[in-house]
Amino acid sequence: MLYLALLFGISKYAFGEWFPPASGGKAVWFYTGLASLLLGNHLVTPYFSKPVDAISYAVAAAAALLGAEELAKWGQTETSVYYFVMVYCLFVLSVSFTAIFARNSEHNWATKISQTAAILASTFGNHRAVFGITMLVAAYLFHRDSVSQTYLICLVCVIGVVARPDELLSGLLRHLRKIWSGAFAPRSLGVVAAIQNPNIYLIRQAENKPTPFGTAVAIKVPGRQAFPAIALDLVGRDEANLLRCIEVRAFDSTRTDLDVSDYQAMREDTAVLIPPESSLASSLMSALVICTDRLVGLVAPDTSNERLYFEVVTTQELEQGLLVQVNVQGRIVIYQILDGLTKEEIVHQKNTLGIVRVQAKKIGIWNANAAKFTPSKWLPFLNEPVLLADQSNQASDENAIGHFPGGAYPVQVANINHLVTHNTAILGILGVGKSMLAIELVERMMAQGIKVICLDLTDQYANELASYYDKAAESAKLSAILAKVDAASSSVEDNPEQGGSIPVLEQELCADLKNFAQPGNTSLLKIYNPARLTATKQTVEPKSYQQGGQWRRGALLWSVTPVEVTRIVTQAVLSIVQEMGMSDSARICLVYEEAHSLVPEWNSVAFDGDKTATAGTARAILQGRKYGMGCLLITQRTANVTKTILNQCNTIFTMRTFDDTGKEFLSNYVGRDYADTLSSLPERHAVFFGRASSCENPVLIQLNDRDTFRQTFRAKFPRQLPRLRSHRRWT
């Protein structure tokens, strides 16, 4: 308002009119000053001129001068001055357009030209240069005959365009007010005792007073202007307490606009406290909040591409599995805490410093669109701030098998077909949630039209999956099968393989499974308890013996074990899917609950026949992948399960376990870092890794709550939906 009043006041005084006469170029100075006010000084670019702004200034100045009608009457001097300004405007336009059009070029030379042109445009095309020259030239060309008009126009140019006395006066008054009101009275904190590049400064405090964590500090060192930092912790003493501070730009490298002019008069190698009520403290507020709320440590030595070590600097509660984040080349990379270690370092002579060093494993860069982590291929710088991962914007996901502890980053089964065809194992001690996880995976399979056959010694699946399983109808079928088996239980044949009731059991189970796998059968779930499928087998040729004075012929019959029933079912399923032909997608999944009792290791079998049966089951599993058949193996005894099948499990969920043999085996899958955490995993937590995981690396996750999963997942995939999908898939 003051500048506008100045413009109109000078016009009224010099010309007797509020608006100067438009003829003869008498109004060029007025409209140039007005353009400077509106486009430059106060509204558009008061501090910095971009090339596009320089274009608008040059066009406005040239347009004002083009309206001059006296060009034909001017002498050589006036004409030269006029064309000088026009050439100047043309030069500004040229370098501005060059800077704009060449900035996205892939050629290095073009990029350098663009940067050079941008500097020239900012220097010669800012509003003060363009409009100042234009007003002075206008005063000479159109008002040189009037000393008073020339003087007044030059005064407007100096005051309104170049000098900006309002800024000088307001800045002076602000500083004086701070001094006399006591608002600006930074207290000396101490001297800089050491610099730990990058970003860390050790301050030897002048007073032995505690400096709270998160206090704003201004530091000045040789070769640099004063800069803001944040107090962290005490790291020991030499002549006085050593306070560790971290530079604010470590939290945000783009912070180059902070006003630290009040602190430039500081002596070098000193630090002062920034008053909380100061404008600088207000501009630092976001960094201070991040520091006090989320900062947990600083990147420590020995950090590698896959493993992060950081020194804890706060009292934030940390725990195994928690996520932290670090800036790596301008991108936020997520790590998962695995372990911690206390260490002691000598800081000065005999003084020591006790620290906590945390080890974390790289997870990757979160891709919100794909809802998964993508790999990061580099490591963070030393002393980079380590923050608690920001998971506030993460929403729950019904497709997630779980999430990272302490937050909502979801972890999904990336491909349900890979979960089946490449086989999956769930390992852990009793009572940690293995069966609930297996049942959840079974529901996800059925939702995609994959048929599931459960070999369950616990009878848990029939109860938990009651809405998917017609128990009455299946019990009737099983009773009919067992009646036929019982009728042949005493059969003895010359060929031992045909003796007993096991041939009948094989025939009846194969028929039942073939009917289950038929395209028209909308049933998705079949459950057998191998311990209840009783049958007999003949192992030797019959022999003659005398009984009651009469000769008879017979042989000993043995009961079939659950391991042999498992072999029968598995081989029957293999023969069925082989008849259907090869398939890239999953068709049938076999679930081995209590797998150590169904497919035991050779040194854990109770009967010699179980070794042969386990070998037969393993061969069938090895062949099944190309036909869309796979298995889900659940066990609490990793060491007692056949490694022939376990080694074929491309996806692993490993939960709490104390078995050294099992942990040694699992270290080959998930790595030694995660294997060492298995004995301390909480209930319903698992290390998840493999082809079916949405994460490239092993991750420690908190599994879904069973009731929450039922509510969300079954709402999206009701019982009727899998049946319809299954029917369409087979037809």
Image: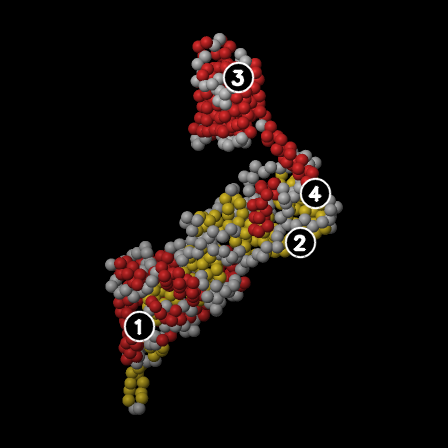
Q: Quadrant of the N terminus?
A: top right
Do callouts 2 and 4 mark residues in contact (Cβ within 8 Å)? no
The answer to which of marks 2 and 4 sits earlier in the sequence is 4
| Vertical order, 395 against 500 (above or below) | above
Seen at 48% across and 46% down, the residue is 376
Residue to which mark 1 is pinned: 474
| Vertical order, 460 against 588 (above or below) | below
> Image check: 621 left or right of 53?
left
Residue to which mark 4 is pinned: 187
The picture places residue 21, in percent across and down from the top left corner, at 47, 18
The answer to which of marks 1 and 2 sits earlier in the sequence is 2
Give the structural element (helix, strand or loop) at label 4: loop
Give the structural element (helix, strand or loop) at label 2: strand
Residue to which mark 2 is pinned: 354
Q: From the image, state whether disc 3 or disc 1 is nearer to you.
A: 3
Q: Nearer the viewer, residue 56 or 289?
A: 56
Q: Disc 4 and disc 3: Cα gap in Å?
A: 52 Å
